[in-house]
Amino acid sequence: MGEGDEESGFIRLEFAEAPADEMLQRARSFYENMDRRRTTRHFSGKEVPREMIELAIRTASTAPSGAHLQPWTFVAISDPGLKARIREAAESEERRFYEERIPDAWAEVLEPLGTDHVKEHITDAPWVVVLFRQSQRERGNGEMAPTYYSQESCGMAAGLFVAAVHNMGLATLTHTPSPMGFLREILGRPEHEHAMLLLPVGYPSDDARVPDLERKGLGDVSQFHE
């Protein structure tokens, strides 16, 4: 295969090797920035330009995916009326979850976080982004076929979205109302799309507070074989 063989479907990888000390500095800087990331449920109504949400979605869409099918749809909502409908439906489901369905083991770990069925972040944040996972795709002949590793692919895209939001100086929350089928209905998504995450995006409110938590250390989350 030649360097300019465009008919092959491949192009040359664009990769510029950096000096080792620069690579280490980049790694430390990025880690220190991300280590300051915190999830909050308290948002300001301060306006966030649409372009910032678009760039976060573009960044998320650079994630690797099974067979490069990119099996995700990010639905971004700023319309107050639509956000109010989503909040009403989410709180209805969450109220039943907290009152009737929550397992004791789950309630045990949620208690220190102070969460409940009230979801003011859905209407307070200027944007709400819902990540839908596509379990099927349309083939060239119009037939539907499965996607592959869609859960893993969307998980990686979600991580990049969260990182992009923090990197631009905003905050977000990974909210998973249970069950989530109402989001497909309200947002008019097809049957093969399944809501995976609801992510409010915006500036934290001036009085935003977060639990006093510590992340696990490197030794708790990794193992090296050298």
Image: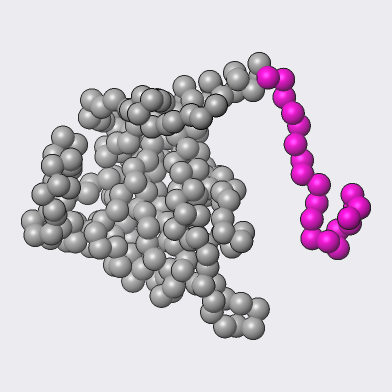
Residue 127 vs residue 130, the one in the foreground: 130
Please give left or right for residue 204 compared with residue 96 in the image.
right
Percent across and percent down for residue 89 are: 23, 62
Residue 153 vs residue 177, the one in the foreground: 153
**Image height check: is 47 above or below 2?**
above
Majority secondary structure of the magenta segment?
A: loop
**The N terminus - image quarter:** bottom right
Percent across and percent down for residue 168 are: 50, 33
Q: Quadrant of residue 96?
A: bottom left
Residue at the left extreme, as displayed: 99
Q: Answer whether residue 76 is visible to the viewer in this image.
A: no
Specify start and end residues of the magenta stretch as a single range. 1-20
**The C terminus - image quarter:** top right
User: Going 53% across and 48% down the picture, which residue do you hit?
Assistant: 60
User: Going 38% across and 25% down the picture, which residue do you hit?
Assistant: 219
Residue 139 vs residue 77, the one in the foreground: 139
User: Going 13% across and 59% down the picture, which residue do you hit?
Assistant: 101
